[in-house]
Amino acid sequence: MSEIKFSVNETIDVHKNTTTKKIDSKYLVIHSPSANWLTLTKEEFFFFYNLQNKLSIKESLVMIYNSLSLCEDKCLSICESVLEKIYNYDFLSKNKGEEEELIENIKKNIQINITSDCNLHCKHCYLSAGKKNRQYLDFIKIKKFISKIDRDKVSDEIVISGGEPLLYKEIFPILKFLRKKNFNIILFTNGTLINESNIKDIAKYVDSIQVSMEGITKEYFEIIRGKNSYSKVMHAIELIKKENIKLVIALTILDSTIDDIENNIDYFCSQLNYDKLEIRLNNVIEKKGNAIKLPNSFFIKSELREEKTENILQKIISNGFSKPSKENRGIKFKNCGIGASIVINQDGLIYPCNDFSFNQGLSIDTDVDVIEYFNQLNRETSYKNIINCNNCDVGFFCCGGCKIKNKLDNGDYKIPTCNKYEIYKKMISRN
Ligand SMILES: C[S@@+](CC[C@H](N)C(=O)[O-])C[C@H]1O[C@@H](n2cnc3c(N)ncnc32)[C@H](O)[C@@H]1O
Ligand code: SF4
Ligand code: SF4
């Protein structure tokens, strides 16, 4: 609050033409033209409404004091909270929101899943990696495909993942090849195969390493990743730190591990004590592969899940291992991102996004211009082209849903399963 300067006699020029939805006990105030929103309590909404109607801060305060039978301190804290939200989320009428860049100008996320083999058999693994169908992408084909890509136009960054990529026989030749092509390389790994004899080579080629966890104490970690895996991963983390490589810990949140993460994340962060660390949360669980066999208790969306996830995120931010995001705010989405990725799987099929269940990939051997093909798919499936979504107040946030889910559920990318109430709830959880 200290950075916000205002005078009590000031009128604040907040967005007008908003729509308000009352969801449970919260008020969601949406300003579609700038792709922005606020989540307010009933009292905060009343205060905000007065500001919106050109009353000064002082007049709005008097108004709530007289109308809501609250003490002065409470009124002041409502006022502070609303002003903080307005300034933090830039909910001011001068903020018009940005147009999203055209798909052809967006740098692609290239991810090569080089194998479906794995030394672990995580209980939630959507790939059932390492158990059956251990495939390895052909090195020659990877080289040929990557050589066709115009790095400067398409992307300067490549993710190498799997399965467990460190099981791929030619992992170092492939990293060397990509490095020669001047790509930044990010390695996704379970960490257990990183040791004293390969860490120097990894450090030579890789710019950043992402290690995955679902629980953060040994007990919960090993329920998912198997016995004796925790100490190996923690050892790998120490080696990564020693080599001064950027480390990302990807925390996939299962309902069975959410309390472990929430209760222990502060201690975990302080123990890691590494300035090149970032912690990312993955809150979307694919019920595929091994995950299908997991009991419901691992997945049932508990009522408190969104709230707990937000709490975990705030803890990570306050520890300095993640930046506050204005997720989706201020950007008028024209697309959901399909085509903004190029995912090459171990079976040689290429996909336009990271969604695992899409089943119409292009072959890595194709003569088709893959980039243009995916760009075209993006343009065609823009929510602006979906009749029912055209005038939707939360279109900038929802973009007509996941296009792949639309296709799988309703047979067409452009037929969404619209559940606005869920969208409103999601927006509320991101305040
Ligand atoms: C498939 S793994 C491949 C890289 C490496 N083996 C690892 O575990 O990080 C990539 C990420 O997918 C996550 N993952 C696995 N199964 C998942 C599922 N059913 N839903 C969501 N994420 C999942 C893992 O936790 C991991 O963070
Ligand atoms: S999540 Fe990663 S480590 Fe676990 S089984 Fe799947 S590929 Fe292997
Ligand atoms: S699917 Fe529904 S909520 Fe989403 S943009 Fe279309 S109309 Fe709006």
Image: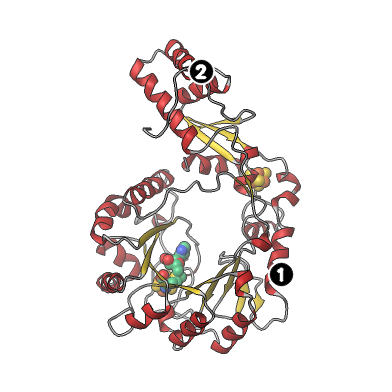
Front-most of residues 211 and 105 = 105
Judge whether residue 291 can be spotted in this image.
Answer: no
Does 426 sit above or below residue 170?
Answer: above
Front-most of residues 304 and 166 = 166
In the drawing, does residue 365 fall left or right of residue 239?
right
* The quarter of the displayed image where residue 243 is located: bottom left
Which residue type carries mark 2?
Answer: Ser
Q: Is there CB contact under 8 Å for labels 1 and 2?
A: no
Image coordinates for residue 67, horizontal then vertical, percent? 46, 12
Identity of the residue drawn at 41% across and 29% down: 81
Q: Nearer the viewer, mark 1 or mark 2?
A: 2
Identity of the residue drawn at 58% across and 44% down: 330
- Crowding around mark 1 (Cα neighbors within 10 Å: few <14, some 14 to 19, many 20+) is few
Q: Badge 2 is on which residue?
A: 56
Identity of the residue drawn at 59% across and 37% down: 95
Does 231 sit above or below residue 277?
Answer: below
Which residue type carries mark 1?
Answer: Glu
Q: Badge 1 is on which residue?
A: 372
Does 112 sit above or below residue 30?
Answer: below
Judge whether residue 211 can be spotted in this image.
Answer: yes
Image coordinates for residue 369, horizontal then vertical, percent? 71, 75
Front-most of residues 86 and 312 = 86
Image coordinates for residue 75, horizontal then vertical, percent? 39, 19
Residue furthest out toward the top: 66
Image coordinates for residue 402, horizontal then vertical, percent? 62, 56
Marks 1 and 2, how far apart at CA: 53 Å
Does 237 sit above or below residue 421?
Answer: below
Q: Helix, strand, or loop for circle 1?
A: helix
Which quarter of the rendered image does ligand 3 occupy?
top right
